Image (cartoon, rainbow, N blue to C red):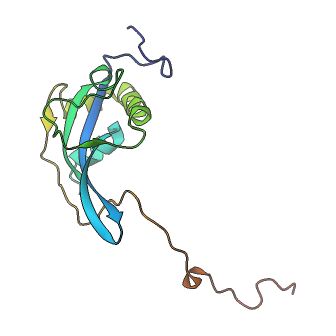
Amino acid sequence: MATSYSNAPDLSADDYLVIGLATCFVKDEGEVHEVQILEPIPSAALEAIVKGIPTSYQLACATTLGSVIGDTLQKPIGLPESAQFGDEFELRAIAAARTYKRRELAKSHIPQGTIRSDFKFSTERKRVLNPKRVVTQDDNIKQHSHTHKVL
């Protein structure tokens, strides 16, 4: 097994990886825009998605680490050109590939080189990629008057 990643000596280019096509949303000046994001899917998440939980993933492609990560990131064949790689993709892909080394059974859900799209796709709970948390006075917890008194 030839090691090809200096920051992941336990992985090689032939290691199994699943890339998902997720429908996410970005808020921009009060408007919400839909975007398609390519993300690595860890084995535990894949097993949950296969069991039928609602997911933002339209499809998933089983490939190898080396076919996606090289000098530049390469989209697997069959995934839309308009899709963008998610934040910290390479780091997350390495982490996801490790999960399949520990849970070999998860590789059986999508054979390498194939795409699976029979998931329970839903955007009911929108995945907003750039949420802004605005803290207001209403967020303060009202404490009982005796909370800080020594009785």
In this rendering, the answer to whether 72 lies above or below 23 is: above
Residue drawn at point x = 23 percent, y = 31 percent: 75
Residue drawn at point x = 23 percent, y = 26 percent: 63
Left/right placement of residue 36 relative to residue 91 reads left
Quadrant location, the C terminus? bottom right
Q: Is residue 55 visible?
A: no
Quadrant location, the N terminus? top left
In this rendering, the answer to whether 25 lies above or below 10 is: below
Q: Is residue 48 visible?
A: yes
Left/right placement of residue 96 relative to residue 151 reads left
Q: Residue 101, how many percent across, how many down?
A: 37, 25
Q: Residue furthest front?
A: 29
Left/right placement of residue 45 relative to residue 108 reads right
Q: Residue 4, how many percent across, how many down?
A: 41, 14
Q: Residue furthest bottom?
A: 145
Q: Residue 30, how many percent across, how many down?
A: 34, 72
| Foreground of the two, 130 or 14 | 130
Please identify the quarter of the rendering in which residue 64 is found: top left
Left/right placement of residue 8 relative to residue 66 reads right
In this rendering, the answer to whether 21 lies above or below 101 is: below
| Foreground of the two, 16 or 4 | 4
Please identify the quarter of the rendering in which residue 111 is found: top left
Residue drawn at point x = 40 percent, y = 32 percent: 90
Count the numbered circles shown: 0
Q: Residue furthest top?
A: 2
